[in-house]
Image (tube, helix red, strand yellow):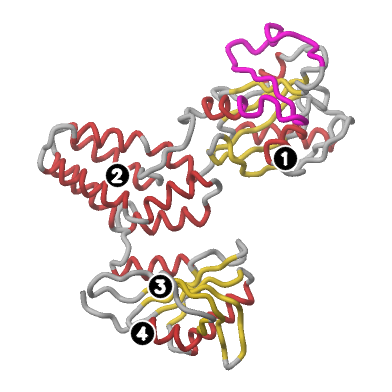
Amino acid sequence: MPRRAVTVAAPATPSGRGGIAAILVTGPDAETIVNRVFRPRGPERGGVSVGHVLWRGDVVDEAVLLRFPAGEGAEPRLEIDVHGGRGSVAAVMAALAEAGAAPLSTPSELRAFLASRGDIDAIQAEAEAALEEAATIEAAAFFAAAASGRLSAEIERLAASLEAREPGAAGRLERLAAGAAAGMALARPRSAVLCGRPNAGKSTLMNAVAGASLSITSDLPNTTRDAVDAVVALSGWPVHLVDTAGLGTDPGGEVERLAARAARRALAVADVAVLVVDGSAPIGEADDLAAALPGGVPAVVAVTRADLEPAFGRDSLPFRGTPSVRVSGVTGEGLESLFAAIVAALSLPPRPPRGPGLFTERQAEAARAAVAASGGGATAEAASVLRALFSPAHGG
């Protein structure tokens, strides 16, 4: 592999997102440039050094330097980890630029640069972008598998098997395509909307699931006026959870009518509705809640205040055929069962896959096209469609 003239430095993590920021330096002069700005405090151990970044003689920040192993003919690649504040990152980038590196501004620019040199393919670039936004540990592990090249290697092996018309290759291709829905749910969280009568316990449930006081709770009805939302982990799946104003009663004033309208808008685009019913009060007439749901939206019933004496039995619920779970936002009783019910209503596996697997619409579209070609006997064409995924030109 020929050596390239440009050495670049770029943030490898989103600006201001976390306590630690990573800055990647790669190119033929990476070692020389980094040595101009980094001063170790002790010996390097296993490719890791602890020290300081200096700029014009002053200490910019404490830092950890990682040297990645490079294969024969590969260019050096080093990572400087510093505190995640924007000021610290900007100062380190300025020091590296003054030392001779060509600065790139964002992780996306870095990915485009690495892809243009052939250091990573389009699938790895997509995985690294998804990894930055991963909302659960399971999602991060899934995208890390793709970023490491495991998904690309699996696709290349499958393409070769299709070309050779190996037994079982078509089945492997179909399983790869079918698994895209799960990967896409990790990349773009599905939505679950809490809806129910005023004071049914929606906000307390929201806070319990999110693990934080996001919604105001009160014994007074209609405390929640605007939709409150957060991305939460349900059985390892990232889910966009939305708490809405009460439904099913006379909305009263203009503010209440606007709040109810916002709740219905949230339900209109929901992937699943969580019908929240107060388990400590008489069930009353609840069919109007089910009627408020848009057609085709799957639902789960959460019977709240399970820590109190139940006011009715499960058979009294009017939502026939809809899974129901007794929960308490105070004690946490039943939450795991509710999570499992929501995940099942979203048609997702009980736990996220570990990967490698497809996770973008671009990838899923190519897999569907490959399945169609393979089913028609054009296995070489199917292999070509899969290999086109390595290039960002495929599918736009």
Residue underneath mark 4? 29
Check disc 2 and report the residue beneath it.
Answer: 366
Q: Are marks 2 and 1 in contact (CB under 8 Å)?
A: no
Dot 3 lies on which element? strand
Foreground mark, 3 or 1, reads: 3
Element at label 1: loop
Q: Residues within 10 Å of mark 3 (few under 14, many from 20)?
A: some
**Magenta-drawn segment:** 309-338
Calculate the distance from the C-alpha at mark 3 to the C-alpha at mark 2.
Answer: 36 Å
The crowd level at tag 2 (other Cα within 10 Å; few <14, some 14-19, many 20+) is many
Kindly identify the amino acid type of the residue bearing the numbered disc 2.
Ala
Identify which amino acid the numbered label 3 is placed on: Arg
Please tell me whether residue 68 belongs to the stretch shown in magenta.
Answer: no
Asked if labels 4 and 3 touch by Cβ distance under 8 angstroms, the answer is: no
Residue at the limit of the structure toward the right, as seen here? 220
Q: Find residue 115 and report its horizontal and vertical position in percent.
A: 33, 65
SS at mark 4 in the image? loop
C-alpha gap between disc 1 and disc 4: 52 Å
Give the Cα separation between the discs numbered 2 and 1. Answer: 37 Å
Query: Could you give the CA–CA distance between mark 4 and mark 2, rounded to whole angstroms?
Result: 39 Å
